[in-house]
């Protein structure tokens, strides 16, 4: 569960709410060449459809079956996407919502034709099928109203209903088999791994028992024999509750949300950049930490929201992502968003439920309401940098409160200047030679002497970043 199955590549992108047809094309026209490991896709499972809430993005976090019919497209579109992406070496990671089904008080029919009824005491999901006996018994949940409301009590967090979402009883063999059946179907199609949504609200032993039922990845989709599903688990541990990330180390990586706050502080106050990884804080060990500057929840104030940097402040955001990809902690994901004015608002649409195509402009940027951070030049270049320096650690760390620089072994060197300019003579750790800055597409370069020293100059307000690699990046 620990290998992302992408030939050592280091960065995945979350194409939040993109359609399967657009993702397939994006793998072929951009992601493969840019060196992305893969794509986290929005939940593909059949979900509630909520016209009364104007089809919010979060309707996809209320599954009604494990059929692959969602707002992003049909099962056939999904399979075609996985196959086309695998063919060009870009992996697909599914956002798997298996802690719960729809919210209480709902009924209807999904895109795959499955009916559902979670009104009152009904728990009918014939598309799986699940019925009332497959949901956590009320007497297992210690909260007064049956909802999660006490994060100091693991039974409350894991046995009660998260915002009224009907909680699956993961202790049952039946439930474990149904969920494993869903995952084995994804595996058989060629999906390389999953994000486990709301893993914090599931017992680690239930996750382990479910994953123990999984098959190896299929060799006919280009995976070496014996490859295992990659797993990263959504556990929001902010040192503010009973659940700790390290309870989930046996079943995969864990989301490290403290990193989001840390990098935001670091960009505001460069002096803090040296202290991003704080094991005293209980941050996950590097070979289990799944990190990102922001995600689909906290960029819009869901899931605790908070002090995170997003695409809305592009200059800061480029620095935050650049630093995240330059340093050596964790496995990294970058966000690709759509513009919104309302935190419930769904993706750009053709009116109603139908998601609009992503429009690619002649200069490679996006329009039609899609931000496409992953296509910004800084992001693209830093993906190349991270892939090029894999396996090295940070050294020659230098920071004067306004600018920061470090080496990645003898393979790469990175510098960044908060005010837009710097000029310092620094140890690069690189062999003597001339190296060009990939961030400005090699318009500038540095000359490293036989002692490894170089004059490091940055003069670029919008993108005050320098990244060079021995032998070129990417
Ligand atoms: C409402 C009331 C409840 C009531 C319930 C009755 O608020 O008090 O009991 O009706 O049915 C939506 C609505 C929410 C509604 C709920 C159920 O916003 O008001 O409850 O549906 O109908 C996303 C959104 C949620 C959304 C949910 C389901 O963020 O707003 O809820 O999808 O559609 C914690 C968790 C963490 C979680 C994070 C948001 O530890 O696991 O909160 N993050 C993940 C996902 C996130 C998703 C879920 C979990 C749930 O990243 O996007 O929530 O799958 O930190
Ligand atoms: Ca639960």
Image: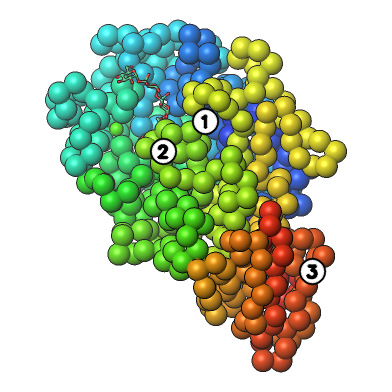
Secondary element under disc 2, as helix, strand or loop, is: loop
Label 2 crowd bin: few (<14), some (14–19), many (20+), radius 10 Å: some
Tell me the tag on residue 65.
Answer: none
Name the residue rendered at 43%, 34% in the picture: 301
Name the residue tied to disc 3.
Answer: 444
Pointer 1 residue? 43
Q: Position of residue 281 (x, y in %)?
A: 31, 60
The residue drawn where x is 44% and y is 19% is: 64
* Residue 118, image x, y percentages: 34, 12
Q: Is residue 12 above or below residue 365?
A: below
Q: CA distance from mark 1 to mark 2?
A: 20 Å
On the image, the x and y values in percent for residue 161 come to: 28, 26
58 in relation to 82, above or below: above
Residue 243 placement, left or right of 263: left
The residue sitting at 30% across, 64% down in the picture is: 280
Mark found first going from the N terminus, 1 or 2:
1
- In terms of secondary structure, where does tag 3 sit? loop
Q: Nearer the viewer, residue 457 or 119?
A: 457
Give neighbour class at mark 3: few <14, some 14-19, many 20+ (Cα, 10 Å).
Answer: some
| Chain-order first, disc 1 or disc 3 | 1
Q: CA distance from mark 1 to mark 3?
A: 43 Å
Element type where label 1 sits in the image:
loop
Disc 1 vs disc 3: which is toward the camera? Answer: 3
* Front tag of 1 and 2: 2
Residue position for label 2: 305
Residue 281 visible in the picture:
yes
Q: Tell me, yes or no, whether the two marked residues, 1 and 2, touch with CB atoms within 8 Å.
A: no
- Apparent side of residue 173 relative to residue 144 in the rendered image (left or right): right
Cβ of mark 1 under 8 A from ligand 1: no
Position of the C terminus, as image quadrant, is: bottom right
């Amino acid at each position: 569960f620990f290998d992302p199955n992408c030939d050592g590549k280091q960065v995945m992108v979350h194409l939040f709410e993109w359609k399967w047809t657009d993702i397939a094309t994006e793998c072929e026209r951009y992601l493969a060449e840019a060196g992305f490991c893969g794509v986290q896709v929005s939940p593909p499972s059949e979900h509630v459809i909520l016209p009364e809430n104007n089809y919010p993005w979060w309707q996809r976090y209320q599954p009604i079956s494990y059929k692959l019919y969602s707002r992003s497209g049909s099962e056939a579109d999904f399979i075609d996407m996985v196959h086309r992406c695998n063919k060009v070496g870009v992996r697909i990671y599914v956002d798997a919502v298996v802690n719960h089904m729809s919210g209480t008080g709902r009924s209807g029919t999904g895109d795959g034709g499955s009916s559902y009824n979670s009104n009152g005491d009904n728990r009918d999901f014939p598309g799986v099928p699940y019925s009332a006996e497959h949901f956590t018994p009320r007497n297992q949940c210690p909260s007064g109203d049956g909802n999660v409301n006490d994060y100091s009590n693991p039974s409350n967090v894991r046995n009660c209903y998260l915002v009224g979402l009907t909680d699956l009883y993961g202790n049952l063999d039946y439930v474990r088999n149904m969920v494993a059946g869903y995952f084995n179907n994804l595996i058989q199609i060629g999906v390389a791994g999953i994000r486990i949504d709301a893993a914090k609200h599931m017992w680690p032993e239930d996750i382990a028992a479910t994953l123990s039922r999984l098959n190896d990845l299929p060799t006919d989709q280009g995976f070496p024999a014996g490859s295992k599903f990659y797993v990263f688990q959504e556990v929001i541990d902010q040192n503010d509750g009973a659940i700790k990330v390290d309870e989930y180390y046996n079943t995969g990586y864990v989301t490290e949300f403290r990193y989001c706050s840390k990098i935001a502080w670091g960009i505001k106050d460069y002096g803090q950049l040296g202290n991003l990884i704080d094991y005293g804080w209980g941050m996950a060990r590097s070979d289990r930490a799944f990190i990102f500057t922001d995600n689909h929840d906290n960029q819009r104030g869901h899931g605790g929201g908070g002090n995170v940097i997003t695409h809305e402040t592009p200059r800061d955001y480029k620095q935050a992502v650049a630093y995240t990809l330059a340093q050596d902690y964790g496995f990294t994901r970058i966000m690709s968003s759509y513009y919104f004015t309302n935190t419930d608002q769904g993706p750009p649409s053709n009116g109603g439920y139908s998601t609009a195509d992503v429009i690619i402009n002649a200069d490679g940027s996006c329009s039609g309401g899609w931000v496409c951070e992953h296509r910004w030049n800084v992001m693209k270049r830093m993906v190349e940098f991270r892939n090029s320096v894999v396996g090295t650690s940070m050294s020659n760390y230098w920071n004067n409160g306004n600018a920061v620089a470090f080496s990645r072994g003898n393979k790469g060197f990175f510098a960044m200047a908060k005010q837009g300019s710097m000029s310092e003579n620094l140890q690069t750790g690189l062999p003597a030679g001339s190296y060009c800055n990939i961030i400005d597409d090699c318009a500038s370069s540095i000359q490293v002497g036989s002692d490894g020293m170089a004059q490091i100059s940055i003069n670029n307000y919008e993108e005050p970043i320098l990244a060079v690699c021995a032998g070129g990046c990417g």
